[in-house]
Amino acid sequence: CSSDLWTATNLTVTANSIGNPADNRVTASKLAETVTNGQHKAVQSGIAAFPTTQYQLSVYVRPNGRNYVYVAANDGVNTYSAFFNVQGGTVGTTANLQNWNIQQNPNGFYLCTLTYQTASTAASQSVTIATSTDGSTLSYAGDLTKGLYAWGALLVQTTNVSPQQFTLPFDQPWTQHRPRSHSSSTESQTTSTKLSATTTRRGTITELNRKCKRRMSDR
């Protein structure tokens, strides 16, 4: 399954499957594994990247037979990644990250966030969202009855931007209650809930998409 921006490999993506965590509209996508032996992932590539610049990647994920999601960005030099347990709300193995965070949200979703700085020679990057059987394994024979729900993938540049530029990752006012957080630092928890930057790329695809509106920055 593929679209103009995201390409699914060994996944069957069904858009508008369940209510999203922001306003409960049925816009979250179902990512179901195929039986193929390999990685089960959705990838967006060809995203512009500035060298030595901080980015924040986030996506809302809910378990559907699989409890683990792998979220990663690659700038052609390094892979910046983390495994998230979206059943227990914990973060597993990480690589090349500055910060990482997981926060409980409505409708059984967790907001999975990672922050990284691109390499000095970076010019473009790709983003990957993949299922995992155990928080470390990515390549395996899939199960048609298992997968994840995903919504609202967002990549934000968080350094070298004007403080007058900002985005909000919802099309509703910021009213969500997030009672649980497991993060690498207090700062990472703050940045994941108070975005103040420019969006690197926003698509209009139904798979893994959320709308953005402007909001006054807290900075």
Image (tube, rainbow, N blue to C red):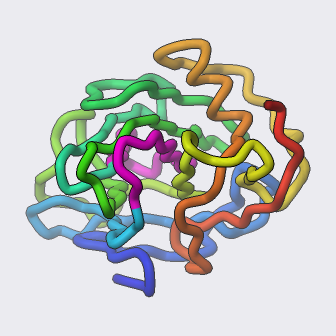
Viewed as shown, does residue 189 lie left or right of 53? right
Q: Please name the residue shown 83% across and 57% down the image.
A: 214
Q: Which residues are magenta?
A: 49-72
Q: Is residue 146 something that shows in the picture?
A: no
Q: Is residue 155 visible?
A: yes
For residue 42, what is the image quadrant? bottom left
Q: Which percent across, then down, holds residue 87?
A: 48, 33
Is 92 or 202 nearer to us in this picture?
A: 202
- Name above or below for residue 114 compared with residue 171: above
Does 53 sit above or below residue 15? above
> Where in the figure is residue 89, as x and y percent of width and height?
50, 26
Residue 69 magenta-highlighted: yes
Q: What residue is drawn where x is 57% and y is 38%? A: 110
- Give the quarter of the image for residue 116: top left
Query: Quarter holding the C terminus?
Result: top right
Q: Nearer the viewer, residue 19 or 56?
A: 56
Q: Which residue does the image show at 28% across and 54% down from the upper left? A: 122
- Vertical side of 3 occupied by 81: above or below: above
Name the chief secondary structure element in magenta: strand
22 vs 90: above or below? below
Quadrant position of the N terminus in the picture: bottom left
The picture places residue 143, in percent across and down from the top left corner, at: 24, 60
Most foreground residue, 181 or 126 = 126
Residue 205 inside the magenta-drawn segment: no
Query: Which residue occupies 36% across, 41% down?
Result: 52
Could you tell me residue 202's position as x and y percent?
Answer: 59, 69
Q: Is residue 114 left or right of residue 19?
A: left
Q: Is residue 199 left or right of residue 132?
A: right
